[in-house]
Image (tube, rainbow, N blue to C red):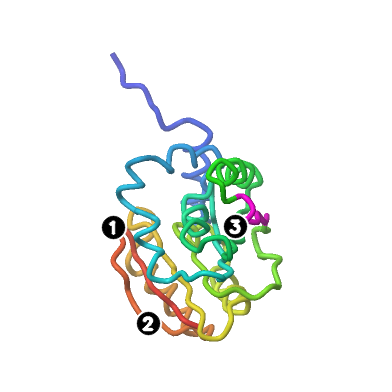
Amino acid sequence: MGSVNRLDGPVCRRFIACKEQNMPFVCPWWGGYFIDNRVRKWLHPPEQILEPYLRPSMTVLDFGCGMGFFSIAAAQLMGDSGRVVAVDLQQQMLDVLRRRADQAGVGDRIRTHRCEADALLLDEPFDFAMAFYAAHEVPDQPRLLREIHRLLRPGAQFLLVEPVGHVRRHAFARTLDQAVEVGWEIVDRPAVRWSHAALLVR
């Protein structure tokens, strides 16, 4: 019997096409259901990762928030006085995040915001920002780095984390070079499982 080709689905075709054209691949919204699971909770415990950087009364930007894996944890860590602006390109992701935030009792601390592929469409100042497994999906990374730099208050930190499986070491190094050119300072390289990570400061 001949083998059955399992790589002919629409998502696989789109992924292959993006790779062939050297374009970023955006995870489909329903992929969030597979990503946010118990294994990831063990692999990337959000409270443990974020706790060193968050304080009460902060306003936090979560770029590429997906279904709220880190947004909800951030809101819980900061308490009633903290606020999270959860930003994503896909409205379906934000809709699921909204439901999950309400169920977790932090819906009043999280505001969802739909961005565009080439613009965040935000002007308010932030005390902390994070982009977890999201920057590699952006077609113009230098622009993203400039926009987040513009939005953060002086001295504010930006946690940038990318997946080892999708982003090569040299590609992440190039992103960090671009960040320095924009005006970021690299102050730490925190250890995050199966990831490239950097803590930047404005």
Give the Cα separation between the discs numbered 1 and 2: 19 Å
Q: Amino acid at mark 1?
A: Arg
Q: From the viewer's perspective, is 136 left or right of 120? A: left
Identify the residue at the far front of this view: 80
Mark 3: few/some/many CA within 10 Å (<14, 14-19, 20+): many
Q: From the viewer's perspective, is 82 left or right of 158? A: right
Q: Which mark is residue 187?
A: 2
Measuring from the top left, give residue 23's x and y in whole percent: 53, 56
Q: Is residue 166 magenta?
A: no
Q: Amino acid at mark 2?
A: Val
Measuring from the top left, give residue 86's x and y in whole percent: 59, 57
Q: Earlier in the sequence, mark 3 or mark 2?
A: 3
Mark 1: few/some/many CA within 10 Å (<14, 14-19, 20+): few
Measuring from the top left, give residue 18's x and y in whole percent: 51, 50
The residue that appears at 52% across and 61% down in the rendered structure is 79
The relative height of residue 25 versus residue 61 in the rendered view (above or below) is: above
- Report the residue marked by disc 1: 193
Cβ–Cβ below 8 Å for labels 1 and 3?
no
The residue that appears at 58% across and 77% down in the rendered structure is 152
Q: Secondary structure at mark 2?
A: strand
* Quarter of the figure that contains the N terminus: top left
Q: Which residues are magenta?
A: 107-114
Give the Cα separation between the discs numbered 3 and 2: 24 Å
Mark 2: few/some/many CA within 10 Å (<14, 14-19, 20+): few
The residue that appears at 33% across and 60% down in the rendered structure is 195
Q: Amino acid at mark 3?
A: Ala
- Report the residue marked by disc 3: 86
